Each structure stands twice: as structure tokens, then as C-alpha cells.
Image (cartoon, rainbow, N blue to C red):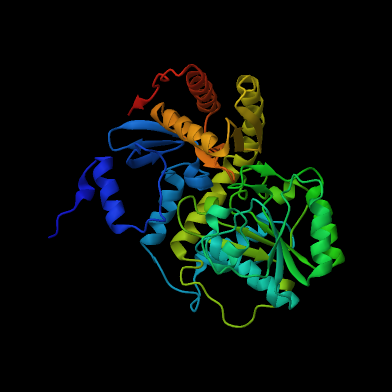
Amino acid sequence: MPTTLCTTNDAEALIQVKKQHIWPCVYHFYRDPPVIARGEGAHLFDTNGHRFLDCYSGVGVMSAGHSNPKIIEAVREQMEQLCHTTTIYISQPMLRLSERLAEVLPENLDSFFFCASGSEANESALLLATLATGRKDFITFENSLHGRTKAAMSATSLPMWRTDPELLDSFHMAPPLADPNCLDAVQRLLQDYEIAAVMYEPIQGNGGIHVMPEGFLSRLKTLCGQYGTLLIADEVQTGINRTGKFLASSGMGVTPDIVTLAKALGNGFPIAVAATSSQLAEAYRKPGASTYGGNPVSASAALAVLDYHMEHQLGDLAQQLGSWLLDVLQEQLSRFSVVKEIRGRGLMVGVEIVRGAEQQTADYVTQLLEDLKDAGFLLGRTGPGRNVLTIMPPLVIEQSDLQSLVDAIEIVLDASNSMKVPPSINQNS
């Protein structure tokens, strides 16, 4: 038997294995990264027994918490019966999930294509829009991220995620959402090109937690209707109650023509879906499949996730906690000159940091994240300049834990101003 270094708890040794065997594009946070071994609710634990408050949820995935016993039990029961088949056969979990999604989504989103990732769901949505309209061009927005497959990456604006040197030329970028001329620019693009669809994120997650301005989405929907253009909502990060509503678009008063969901739908199990109306779905009749689309285990997990969200009213909790969190962050952090803006909706919140030039700011945020990690808090970082501290915890998080997070951010900002090392408030399990 070959020996392996992966039995060690030593992060440096594991990093060497990663460098040897994993493509270099797969990066990790932190100069001194923890080796995560298990999770429970809103907490993660490393191999040394240190406990961390998970404030990022694996990029918005673990909405119902780590190691949720209700989801584990549903998955275990399904695995004892059937782990995999394909859509060329009929199996119950995928069809039960389709019925359930039709109940919780807006009325005209009742037809589904299941797949395994958000990128794949967005590719499917773009394909359907082309088939339904006979057009090949699309509009997306600056600071967007829609995935890492060919069309999804072409739809993406953030430079760090546009790594393919030969991207498709059928995607046109409108200005950032906050730009007052954005809708005028969209209209000019609609006039100049035969646009199949406009794809948007209700809140640009990786773009730095930028929320669509009030009334913007309704005006965009009207504008698309005038040109026979479809509206695609990428709700891979915002969907499944992250913002306090099952769909963030619904909270903005709009039902799109196509919606994509992933991440929180499976709570750690790979599943994604493109949802549309039965009428639009009719345009896609040639054979189409995803090997793991509607996988019975992932579908059973998703059903348990939806049950748990409803039973524990996680949407209401996200709305209430998110509103409280924005107020507390504003109250405790607005005194710091490096805090440019605090924004978000529900439990999808960003704290934008600016300290000098872009690289200086990025280095400063890197140190803040390192200090927060050492204090027991794992956050994300987003934005074109990677300068937005990003808070997307499991929706099961306690208010007291969020207060501890805000206190910790205040401590590290104070320490960074005085060049002191912040005290560790890490706890052992």
C-alpha cells in the first residue's frame, strides 16, 4: 500500500500534497489555513479541535447548518435504497422534488431541468433562452459571476474569473447596477442586438454584495418585455431564503422567465436546477441530460432541506437577523475610516474596506481575514478588488454568535489601527 501524507493534521504537509496533486487554479484562503475536519450547526472544527464560527457557509451552501440530522437521515434512507440511476429511467425522488419546487416557486416556474452545479444550471438557462427565442446574444452586468463553464464564464464580468482566453463574443456587459445610466445602457444594447435574454444576480455575491437598487428589476422586466427578451435570474447564491425570501427576485416584486438555483438547495449535496414555465420549456425537446441531474440521493437531500426551511421558518429568521445585523454593523463599525460601506439583504452582507490603493487594501483585508480566523471566525472576501468582508452564515446561526462576530471585527479593526495583535477568542471543542 502506498503511504500518504493526508493522514496528518499538519497543514503545511497537506499543502504540499495539494501543490503536488491538485491543479494550481484551486486556491485556498489564509497563510496559515485550518484543516477542517467536521461541522455542527453554524460551527466548523479543525483537526486540532479549534472551533470556528462559519460565517461563509461554504460560499452560501450550508443554509440549514452543518451535519443537520434531518438531512442526514433522509440521505441515509435513500442511500440504503438507491444511490444512482439516470433520467433514462423513472425514479421518485427527482419527481417528488419537482412537485415540491412547483409548490414553493412562483406560479409560472413549474418546469425543471436538474443538474449538479450552478454553472451547469446557468448553461442550461442560456441554452433554453437561445432555443426559445432563436437569438444568440445576451446581456449581463459588470461585477457579475455566473460560473466557470464556457458560456457561464463568458457571461461573467469579474476579471479574476474570466480565465478562458477565447470567451464567446455574444455576451454584452451593461454597467454596474449602481450606475444611474445602467438601464439606459441596457436599452441601447437591446436596440443594437437581437438579445435572447438578460441574465442578472439580484445581489451580486462575488461582485461585492451589491443589491439591485429599489425598482430596478421591475423596470428591467418591463424593458425586456418591450423587446421580446427573456429575463434570467441567477439565484445560485441568493435563492432558498438567503435574503429572507425563497427567491430574492420575489422580494423585489418580479418573477423572471428562468431561474437557476443550486448551493443551498442541497445543503452540501451537489444539486442544481433551472426552472421555467412549461410553455418555455417546450423549446427544448431535443435530447438533453445531466448524468447526475436529479440524482436520488441529492434530490432526497433537497427535499429534506426544503422541509427543514419551512418547519423552522428560515426565511423569516434570515430576514429578521439580517436586518438586525446590518444595524449592529453600522452602529459598531461606522466609526472606522477604512469601512467604506455596509450593505446587503437578509444574511448576505458585505463590509467594504478601503485603505489606500487597491493592492494595499487587498493586503490589509488579507490580514483582517487572518486575524479573524485566528480569533475563531471564518468569513469570505468578495468584490473586484477582493476588499469586501463577506458574511453569509448558515441561516440557523444564533443572534449571539452574530454579535460575537461583529465584536470580533471591531476588535481586529481597532488592533489594525493600533498595530496591536488582537486577542484570540478561539475555543476548543
Location of the N terminus (image quadrant): bottom left
Residue extending furthest toward the right: 226
Percent across and percent down for residue 219 are 84, 53
Q: Nearer the viewer, residue 7 or 341?
A: 341
Is residue 281 left or right of 189 when viewed as pictured? left
Q: Is residue 31 visible?
A: yes
User: Residue at 49% of width from left, 50% of height from top?
Assistant: 267
Q: Residue 404 appears at what percent x and percent y?
A: 50, 23
* Figure label count: 0
Res. 281 visible in picture: no
Q: Residue furthest bottom?
A: 286
Horizontally, residue 418 falls left or right of residue 282, namely left
The residue at 58%/47% (across/down) is: 206
Quadrant in which residue 127 is drawn: bottom right
In this view, 349 is above or below 164: above
Picture coordinates of residue 401 (x, y %)? Answer: 50, 27
224 or 153, nearer to the observer: 153
Establish if 59 lies above or below 360.
below
For the C terminus, the quadrant is top left
Q: Residue furthest front?
A: 357
The image shows residue 305, relative to residue 133, as above or below, that is above
Q: Looking at the image, which residue is at 60% across and 32% down? A: 354
Q: Residue 314: percent from the left, percent from the top?
A: 59, 40
